[in-house]
Image: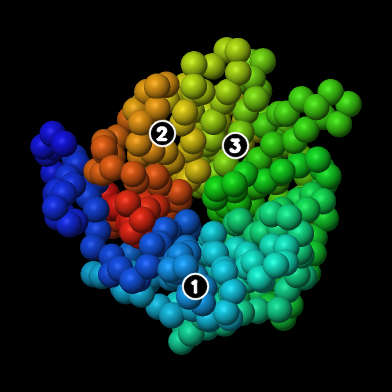
Amino acid sequence: MAALAGASLMIGSAAFAASGWSVVPVPPTGNNAQLNGVSARTSTDAWAVGQQFGAAGQAPPPPVSYHWNGSTWSPVATPNFGQRANLLAVSASSASDAWAVGFSIPEGDDDTTLIEHWNGTAWSVTSSPVVTGLNARLTGVADLSPSNAWAVGEGSTGPLLEHWNGTAWSAATVPDPGFRPGAGQAISASSATDIWLVGSTTNPATGTAAAEALHYNGTAWAVRAMQQPGTNTPTLAAVTAISAANAWAVGEDIGATSALGGSTLIEHWNGSSWSVVPSPTPGAYPGLSGVAARGPNDVYAVGNNMPSINGGVVQGMILRWNGSAWSADTDPTSGSYSPLYAAATLPGGTNEWAVGTLSSNPLIVSHG
């Protein structure tokens, strides 16, 4: 790998460096592992969660979680309930209130939705409207306060939306039964009265898919139309809400008017409508699954791609908005198997984070 400017870190025999982005030391789990979700509440309080894969013949290990205290990422134990389990997203409203969501797979049974809570001392499994079935899982969560949180995902028969009122989780109605939430960080809130959920919807008569957003104004969820990128099949996976007049949604665009192998897809909300914003597509077969904003002129999206339409190793992809245009940032692990799945920062934050996996090890990268 060619030398790149910036900080570097040795992992095994490989040195990884990038202009602005660097790999952060993460204690290994002892198993193959990946990180799927990340959340930053303050510059000294952030969480990353995911899954690990035990050796054949051994009891399935529990999901993984790591906590950032301002100087290091440290592992934090999660409940071990003797079955395969995966945490896909995490969000915190305080040092003693965080939610992580995902799914478990009891031996020989269908998938089952999973919600865990952090009370400042330990993670514990929380009772919720449990949904089972093929690919039943919760994929996103937004924790606004100890008495207000939302979780989103999919069941075997349609979208899932659940709300926490401080006492219990309950199912909420999705205004479009054909809506499918994005597979990444599909929910984000700038306040309790400004919450976005992105994904796609399918016309039952034609089978045509379209990008779609749902918005919560503090009282009800409603469909908000999104601009469609030509005669293609758009997929929006992640959203970040900066303010009532500023939000970004990211994903992938595949079809006749996109590049061979697909193109990145980024849309912007200006307070009245969504519109497609031009974005680069480094490599091929792109998939943006995370987006976060340190400010209106400092937004970044992460995901993965391949070097070319001829294939190659799946690697991380990072794009950045500087207030006027999107451009490609340099991935610090280029050339290694290193997809990125989620991003997190906060207004004026010290660090911008992205998480994924690096050759079967948990991966966290940081931009100062």
Mark sitting on residue 224 = none
192, above or below 205, in the image? below
Q: Position of residue 205 (x, y in %)?
A: 88, 26
At label 2, counting other C-alpha atoms closer than 10 Å, the crowd grade (few under 14, some 14-19, many 20 or more) is many
Q: Are marks 2 and 1 in contact (CB under 8 Å)?
A: no
329, above or below 12, in the image? above
User: Which residue extends farthest front?
Assistant: 57
Residue 131 in the figure: left or right of residue 30: right
Q: Which residue is mark 2?
A: 305
Q: Are marks 3 and 1 in contact (CB under 8 Å)?
A: no
- Which numbered disc, 2 or 1, marks the residue that appears first in the sequence? 1
Q: How far apart are the alpha carbons under marks 2 and 1?
A: 33 Å
User: Which residue extends farthest top?
Assistant: 257
- Which numbered disc, 3 or 2, marks the residue that appears first in the sequence? 3
- Foreground label between 2 and 1: 1
- Foreground label between 3 and 2: 2
Judged from the image, the secondary structure of the residue bearing numbered disc 3 is strand
Between residue 64 and residue 124, name the one nearer to us: 64
Could you tell me the amino acid type at mark 3? Leu
Mark sitting on residue 236 = 3
Q: Which residue is mark 1?
A: 57
The quarter in which the N terminus is drawn is: top left
Q: Position of residue 12 (x, y in %)?
A: 17, 57
